[in-house]
Image (cartoon, helix red, strand yellow):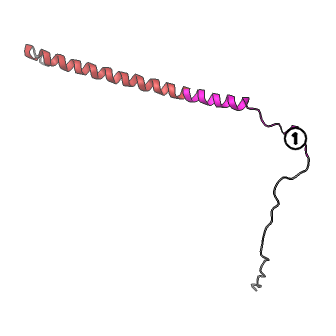
Amino acid sequence: MRKLADPNLAPILSMLWRFACESARDDAQEFVADAAMQETVPSIRQVEHEAIEQEDLEASPPNVLDNEATGENFAPPVELELAPPEKVADAA
């Protein structure tokens, strides 16, 4: 490769190198941000999952044994209005 020693090109080459460095720095920042996000999101989800499990464990289940069996039925009566079945003619 030929070495160009033109002093008039020095500012342009300097500017090109600066753009290359800025672009590399931006790419590196995006890479680090993506890597940090991938590590953070699962840990946040894990913390939320553990909190939900802890709430489930702390919630007291209904104590069914305290209720006395009275045999009373508080459901409303059900009345079905059915038409009498129709006679089906023999298929034979």
Q: In which quarter of the image is the C terminus?
A: bottom right
Residue 48 x %, y %: 60, 29
Picture residue at 8% right of the left edge, 13% below the top: 7
Decide which of 47, 73 is in the foreground and name it.
Answer: 73
Element class at badge 1: loop
Q: Is residue 64 magenta?
A: yes
Decide which of 16, 64 is in the foreground and name it.
Answer: 64
Picture residue at 35% right of the left edge, 21% below the top: 28
Asked if residue 56 lies left or right of residue 32, the reply is: right
Residue 63 is at least partly visible in this image: yes
The amino acid sitting under disc 1 is Asn
Classify mark 1: residues with Cα within 10 Å, few (<14), some (14-19) or many (20+). few
Picture residue at 78% right of the left edge, 70% below the top: 81
Picture residue at 18% right of the left edge, 18% below the top: 15
When the figure is inspected, residue 36 is found, relative to residue 82, above or below; the finding is above
When the figure is inspected, residue 84 is found, relative to residue 12, above or below; the finding is below
Label count reads 1
- Residue span colored magenta: 44-69
From the image, tell me which residue sits under label 1: 67
